[in-house]
Amino acid sequence: MAMTAPTKPPHTSPSDPASGPPSGESLHSPVIDWFDENARDLPWRRPEAGAWGVMVSEFMLQQTPVNRVLPVYEQWLARWPRPADLAKEAPGEAVRAWGRLGYPRRALRLHGAAVAITERHGGDVPADHAQLLALPGIGEYTAAAVASFAYGQRHPVLDTNVRRVFARAVTGVQYPPNATTAAERKLARALLPEDEPTAARWAAASMELGALVCTAKSESCHRCPIAAQCAWRLAGKPEHDGPPRRGQTYAGTDRQVRGRLLAVLREAHGPVPQSALDRVWHEPVQRARALDGLVADGLVEPLAGGLYRLPLT
């Protein structure tokens, strides 16, 4: 999650939480007040980050924790303070600078978005939600997040943290579905404050609540500003009875092999021979499959003579 620091909006008045499932009005004030007191000071939340800083952070924070993102984010913005600066570089340089954040296709997508912003919008990240959504590599979540956090607009911003807060506080279940559903989108729209500045603050506050308090593994209800009206807590915290939650395995997977192959290419100053890549993983079939996948994804460029490099085009 990322946002600049908008001015503190007016809060709505809470309704009686005992009258049924909590409404948006009953949730907004306590969650936003909590956020005002407890929000982390993160570089992409500062006004000087601008829309480009917000966008970069949103790409990096997908499936990657804040502590791993921070140093890479700072280096990225120092090197490429505007989209046009990144657009001038080869896409392989974005992959190199991505380091070990994981899921490196995000680096290629961010580079593609920078090129499109430079060509279509004069180098400025567009404020219009539809124009954001039309950028390559920008999906429903990222478009809403940038429009909300960078430009203070009113959009439902549904990441894993927000979905978990809504599932527990309003729906009364421990975890949201594995994939975002139409019902979740409808609920997020229903909970969204009418006032734009309040809606943007609510989006950031509910996300921070999920990240710091209503976490996946160890919720801290004693620190939660809406514990008294949380449907899941009031129901006795029933155990999850839906489909098994997906794990994040890594060791021994193709993802690990891909990471090791990319590490060799990132550290090289020129093309790398096949023999250097062969040394990173003992199992030849899996190694070849991982390398083929990197080539297919545009992350690695094969050259004549059995050489490989990060992509130049």
Image (tube, rainbow, N blue to C red):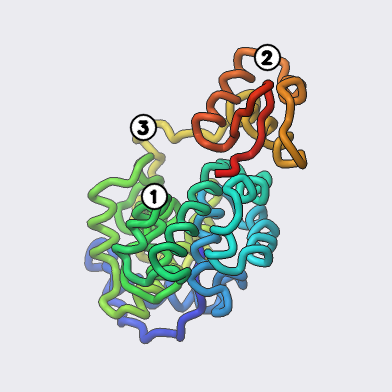
Determine the residue located farthest toward the front in the rendered image: 304
Instruction: Read off the residue under disc 1.
Output: 236
Q: CA distance from mark 3 to mark 1?
A: 20 Å
Amino acid carrying mark 3 in the image: Pro
Give the secondary structure at mark 1. Answer: loop
Rendered view: 286 above or below 83:
above
Q: Residue at x 60, y 43 (%)?
A: 312
Left or right, 21 with respect to 225, comes to: left
Q: Residue 48 placed where, x, y %?
A: 58, 78
**Circle 3 Cα neighbour tier, 10 Å, few/some/many (<14 / 14–19 / ≥20):** few
Instruction: Read off the residue under disc 2.
Output: 283
**Quarter holding residue 199:** bottom left
Amino acid carrying mark 1 in the image: Gly
Q: Residue at x 66, y 53 (%)?
A: 68
Left or right, 79 with respect to 38, comes to: right
Amino acid carrying mark 2 in the image: Glu
Rendered view: 152 above or below 217:
below
Question: Quick one: label 2 or label 3, which is nearer the N terminus?
Answer: 3
Front residue (pair 190, 87): 87
Q: Which numbered mark, 1 or 2, is in the foreground of this view?
A: 2
Front residue (pair 5, 167): 5
Instruction: Read off the residue under disc 3.
Output: 243
Q: Residue 74 placed where, x, y %?
A: 67, 64
Q: Residue at x 53, y 64 (%)?
A: 83
Q: CA distance from mark 2 to mark 3?
A: 33 Å
**Circle 1 Cα neighbour tier, 10 Å, few/some/many (<14 / 14–19 / ≥20):** few
